[in-house]
Image: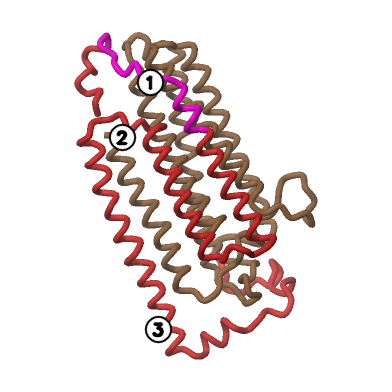
Amino acid sequence: MMWYFLMTDAFTFGAFLISYGSIRFATNGWPDPNEVFRSFPGVPADVHLPLVFVSLMTFILIMSSVTMVLGVAAGHRNDQKAVTKWMILTIIGGILFLSCQAWEWTHLHGEGAWWGRNPFLNADGTQSTTNFTNFFFTITGFHGFHVFSGVIINIIMLIKNMRGDFAKRGHYLMIEKAGLYWHFVDLVWVFVFTCFYLL
Amino acid sequence: MEHIQTAGAPSTHHEPEFSTKPIWRTFWILLGITAAELVIATIHLKTGFPPKFVVNGIYLILTCAKAFYIIAEFMHLRHELKNLIMTLGITCLLFVWFIIAFLYEGNSYKELRNRYDPYKVEQSKTKVASPEEHGPAAKKPGSAE
């Protein structure tokens, strides 16, 4: 059933991203993402590091996906201790990603970007529309909410695992299902990363 | 979906091939692709050599490659029943039409507007004098907070 839920979720995200693409194709100018996303925490504002921070976020999410799948593999071996360890690492990865996103949102908000206002100019120096920020905050926000609920689900799975529920049951299928959801979140990020930061 | 048959009998737990080696290999592939995207982006920024549409094509291919690896290995779909793979895969083909149709639609809207709305074209060609003027301070009165 998890697969069918993820399928519907994929279409929700797909609809969001395609409407973004459609609006972008219908607009004459668009801001250059390398100009907008070029900051890194702790680095002075005049040092421009395009794409570095978001690559770090991608790395964190891929890493937490790896720890999750290692947790699932440990569940296949009925190794309760190892499942606990990998679940904790996955949760840490998820929280790190959310913190990065919180920093990025705060930073952009500080630069004057929010729903309904867009301080960035188009790549050719003309006035930009607010579609850019609207789509950015809506889609990364929706994705961030998925990460958040994924972290909550993982915490619940961790508690159930530490209480020995899965060991009693004899299999770790719930871990596997939570893992599917978590990988899906990673998968969506791959597309969000491409659509907003690279293209 | 495979596990439905075995759910009642956990002792018959299968898939001895669920080893950690392919997981790490997949991780390195994903990391490598992301690093490659970064390198391409940096080269494009510094020299502008590969034209933007070529770079975008490369990004899209690499993104699909990453998606494939995540779904096949991390989500373990490659090792599931063929029927499940088909159910999901064929439904995903809808996305092909979905993307082409809507991007075409957007482009056609832009062309129509550029042809029939000269004011819009003029506005989209006017450069903004200084970025500071249109920063956070120059918020439009009606803009949402």
Residue in the image at 25% along x and 11% along y: B12
Sooner in the amino-acid sequence: mark 1 or mark 3: 1
Disc 3 secondary structure class: helix
- Asked if one can make out residue A108 in the rendered structure from this viewpoint, the answer is no
Residue in the image at 44% along x and 34% along y: A182
Which residues fall within the magenta stretch?
B10-27
Which dot, 2 or 3, sits closer to the camera?
3
Report the residue marked by disc 2.
Answer: A2
Q: Mark 3: which amino acid? A: Leu
Residue in the image at 37% along x and 14% along y: A166
Which dot, 1 or 2, sits closer to the camera?
1
Tell me the tag on residue B18: 1
Residue B132 sits above or below residue B78 on the image? below
Give me the chain that's brown: A
Disc 1 secondary structure class: loop
Q: Nearer the viewer, residue A92 or B26?
A: B26
**Residue A145 at what x, y percent from top left?**
48, 43
Circle 2 crowding by C-alpha within 10 Å: few under 14, some 14–19, many from 20: few
Question: Would residue A69 appear left or right of B91 to someone viewing this image?
Answer: right
Q: Chain B colour?
A: red
Q: Chain of mark 2?
A: A
Report the residue marked by disc 3.
Answer: B112
The picture quadrant where one finds residue B47 is: bottom right
- Distance from Cα at disc 2 to Cα at disc 3: 43 Å
